[in-house]
Image (cartoon, rainbow, N blue to C red):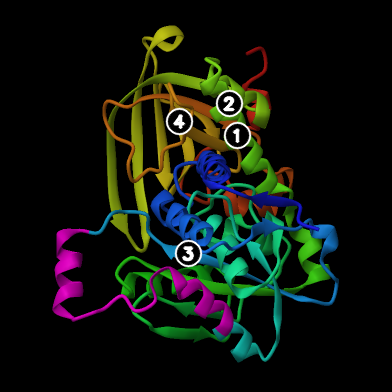
Amino acid sequence: MPRGTLRNRQDCEDFTCGCLFMGTGGGGGIEWGTRMLDAALEEGLNIEWVDVSEIPDDVWTCTPYGMGSIAPPTPETEAEIKRMGLVDRLGDRAMEVAVQELGKYAAVEIGVIVAAELGAGNTPAPLITGVRLGIPVVDGDYAGRAIPEEMQGTPYLYGKDSFPLASVDRWGNVVILKEACSPHMLERIGKMMAVAAFGTCTIAATLLSGREMKEIVVPGTLTRCLSLGRAVRQAREQGDDPVQAAIEHTGGWLLFEGEVTGKDWEGRGGYMFGTTHIKGTGDYAGHTLDVWFKNENHVSWLDGEPYVCSPDLVAIVDRETGEGFTNTVIDAGHRVAVVGIKGLEAFRSERGLAGAGPRHFGFDIDYVPIEKLMEGK
């Protein structure tokens, strides 16, 4: 029996709202996720997921996801696409093709889809891919948030290979990566394929048995995204504080409130890098918060001093609606609240911090658990 079902447009909106919040600034474009969900509804497809306990141990599972930068395309990029005469042949169906190509290469029947992460685009996309292929989708993912790299997912943490993988872009290019010498190189090669495709490609990877998948999946996260989005919307409709509703629902903390004064960013190597600058208002007047992102938010500074960092979550949301922002769209003038949420405990290990802590991202900062930073608040 399905664990969760998106029956109508309201359910889909609540689901993407929750995914966007947990995307911490990344996780794929909400337009992509919404478009796929809307199309499935219009076709009368059953959009549902199943509990991990219902998955047989011997079935093959795989993880399809979007790879590339969330940065908007430049006019130069669009001109080069036109000059090369590229035509979008696959559109939103590229992910389905990637799953099929991986199955063909590995000579296995893929029977279960597992999302790599949470995000307004990168969770609906594998969900709808499974629906269209008639393959069950697990109520869970491999990160408990959105992540920019292989090293922030549980397959890396527990030493599971993500190769072989199939990469398919919207132009119709198909690439099989048979083997990678390390997770870092797999990530680099994937990003270079996305760069070659002028921004993004879709990948099917991480072939695991049902038994192996159950050992490393973060269970129940699709259901939690749906209930989070619903809680935020209902609080707003009832005249309550949607940000507070989200904090209560996630067990998080209010880190800051203020107005975005600017955003410095660049697209480089298949990622969007930058820093969002926020000037405090209300109880936070006279203070500043700076949040650095690599697609997603990972390092923050309160009044110039290191504050909440990955693997804990830093979500910047609209102060009035409680809805999240991707770093593509957040800009000066937005009035925001910043919410911190405890990340996966397993990533606080030495190996976990080596792949997801502030030093992995190039900052000479000691990771301090968010609950310690929040003591007395």
For residue 368, the mark is none
Q: Residues within 10 Å of mark 1 (few under 14, many from 20)?
A: many
> Which mark is in front, 2 or 4?
2
Residue 37 horizontal side relative to residue 156, left or right: left
Name the one closer to the observer, 105 or 94: 94
Question: Alpha-carbon distance for marks 2 and 4?
Answer: 16 Å
| Label 2 Cα neighbours within 10 Å, binned few <14 / some 14-19 / many ≥20 | some
- Verify CB contact (< 8 Å) between mark 2 and mark 4: no
| Residue with the mark numbered 2 | 234
Q: Residue at x 64, y 48 (%)?
A: 144
Three-letter amino acid code at the position of disc 2: Gln
Find the magenta span and give its range.
74-100
SS class, disc 4: strand
Is 79 a magenta residue?
yes
The residue labelled by disc 4 is 317
Q: Quadrant of residue 72?
A: bottom left
Q: The residue tagged with tag 3: helix, strand or loop?
A: strand
The three-letter amino acid code for the residue at tag 1 is: Arg
Mark 2 and mark 1 in contact? Answer it, CB < 8 Å.
yes
Residue marked by disc 1: 230
Instruction: Name the secondary structure under disc 2.
Output: helix
The kind of residue tagged 4 is: Val
Read off the residue under disc 3.
66
Please tell me which residue lies in front, 239 or 65: 239
Q: Earlier in the sequence, mark 2 or mark 4?
A: 2
Q: CA distance from mark 2 to mark 3?
A: 31 Å
**Magenta span main SS:** helix
Residue at x 62% of width, y 42% of height: 225
